[in-house]
């Protein structure tokens, strides 16, 4: 099996190129220390692609994503592309990549790093030891349902979005979540709105059917509104959480409050396809947005992007030792007191994006030798 990986990289907009640069440098260092090869093939998506090509996801970029072993993506969007009436928007690149690559399972780890407990908005007693993985269904639901349109009729303007799921769509993502829970603390929470929505009643029914395949995993159903409360009242009670597309989008942003900053959070989007390394072909991106207000100021936090790169090493590049070393380096950087502005604490050293990336690589050098 080849040890040479090809990664399609799309730096994105705003702070995207800055944080992706640091993530790439960390992967390159891992490649040297753990003796594998990475070829980077760079393309353009999002707002930058709209400006250059008139579309958020040019055909060459989509081909590049399909041909690589993994995709590393920076945030897209910005105020110059925010016209809600525009026929072309940066976010279309995300939806197009997810759908085009068949990436139906979005993994979002929510882990509270011990050195950052005091940086979070919640009390330390609530969040110490929090370690949750959200599994969000990514290619179905209201974001992809048809029709999705505006209409004008006798009563004026009307907008409609369609929420639809098939049992196959539910079963495949729930099965991913059960398998993940089996390898962790064997507890799965399925979030829905089954008291109101027909799609959620189907979701719950199919989840219970799949649960029979995993008798060793405890499965609990929670309504989404209750889950929003439980996340802030008893977050340590949760291990793996699986939910539909829109609920997952909202809940994972709420869960960022547990970690102190969106800038810390990575994500992996996976499907069923395998790459030439025999691993899952996936897309990796930090959860935070493009933050245009700080773009070009060296103020962005690169740790979410670097953590996303660690997930890429583990899931798509078949390099678990390199992934573990990079994650350990991030922990050491935080323990040493390095902080970007979003996670700044009294007594810690305020640093920039490039300096934080350099500190992470210095710790990685010490770990990997």
Image: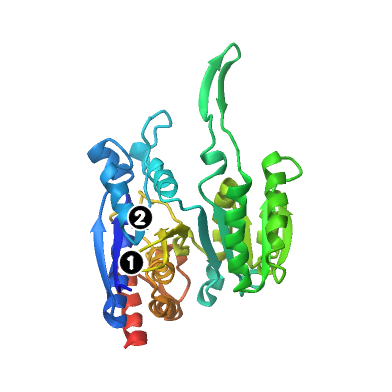
Residue identified by numbered label 1: 23
Element marked by disc 2: loop
Residue projecting furthest to the front: 1
Residue projecting furthest to the right: 195
- For mark 2, does the 10 Å Cα neighbourhood hold few (<14), some (14 to 19), or many (20 or more) residues? many
Counting the numbered discs, the total is: 2
Give the image location of residue 23, x and y in percent: 33, 66
Which is more toward the observer, 176 or 48?
Answer: 176
| CA separation in Å, label 1 and label 2 | 10 Å
Residue identified by numbered label 2: 74
* Residue drawn where x is 41% and y is 70% of the image: 310
Task: Answer with mark 1 or mark 2, whichever residue precedes in sequence.
Answer: 1
Quarter of the figure with residue 308: bottom left
Give the answer, above or below, for where 210 lies relative to 224.
below
- On the question of residue 76 being in view, the answer is yes
Residue projecting furthest to the top: 154
Element marked by disc 1: helix
- Colour logic: rainbow
Give the answer, above or below, for where 133 lies relative to 322.
above
Quarter of the figure with residue 118: bottom right
Give the image location of residue 362, x and y in percent: 31, 80
* Residue drawn where x is 37% and y is 41% of the image: 90
Give the answer, above or below, for where 75 lies relative to 91.
below
């Amino acid at each position: 099996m080849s040890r040479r990986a090809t990664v399609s990289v799309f730096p994105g907009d705003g702070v995207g190129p800055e944080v992706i640069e640091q993530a790439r440098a960390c992967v390159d260092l891992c490649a040297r220390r753990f003796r594998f090869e990475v070829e980077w093939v760079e393309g353009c998506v999002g707002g930058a692609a709209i400006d250059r090509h008139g579309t958020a996801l040019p055909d060459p970029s989509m081909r590049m994503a399909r041909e690589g072993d993994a995709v590393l993506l920076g945030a897209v969007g910005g105020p110059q592309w925010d016209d809600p009436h525009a026929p072309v928007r940066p976010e279309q690149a995300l939806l197009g990549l997810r759908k085009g690559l068949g990436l139906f399972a979005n993994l979002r780890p929510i882990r509270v790093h011990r050195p950052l407990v005091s940086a979070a908005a919640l009390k330390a007693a609530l969040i110490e030891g929090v370690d949750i993985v959200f599994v969000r269904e990514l290619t179905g639901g209201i974001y992809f349902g048809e029709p999705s349109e505006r209409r004008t009729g006798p009563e004026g303007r009307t907008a409609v979005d369609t929420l639809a799921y098939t049992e196959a769509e539910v079963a495949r993502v729930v099965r991913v979540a059960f398998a993940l829970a089996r390898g962790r603390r064997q507890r799965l929470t399925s979030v829905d709105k089954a008291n109101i929505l027909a799609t959620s009643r189907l979701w719950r029914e199919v989840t219970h059917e799949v649960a029979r395949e995993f008798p060793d995993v405890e499965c609990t159903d929670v309504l989404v509104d209750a889950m929003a409360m439980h996340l802030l009242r008893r977050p340590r009670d949760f291990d793996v959480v699986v939910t539909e597309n829109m609920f997952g989008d909202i809940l994972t942003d709420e869960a960022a409050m547990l970690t102190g900053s969106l800038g810390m959070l990575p994500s992996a989007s996976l499907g069923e396809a395998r790459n030439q390394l025999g691993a899952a072909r996936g897309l990796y991106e930090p959860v935070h947005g493009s933050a245009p207000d700080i773009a070009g100021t060296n103020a962005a936090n690169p740790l979410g992007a670097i953590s996303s790169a660690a997930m890429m090493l583990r899931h798509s590049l078949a390099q678990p030792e390199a992934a573990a070393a990079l994650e350990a380096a991030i922990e050491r950087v935080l323990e040493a007191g390095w902080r970007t502005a979003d996670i700044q604490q009294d007594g810690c050293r305020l640093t920039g994006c490039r300096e934080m990336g350099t500190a992470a690589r210095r710790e990685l050098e010490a770990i990997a030798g």
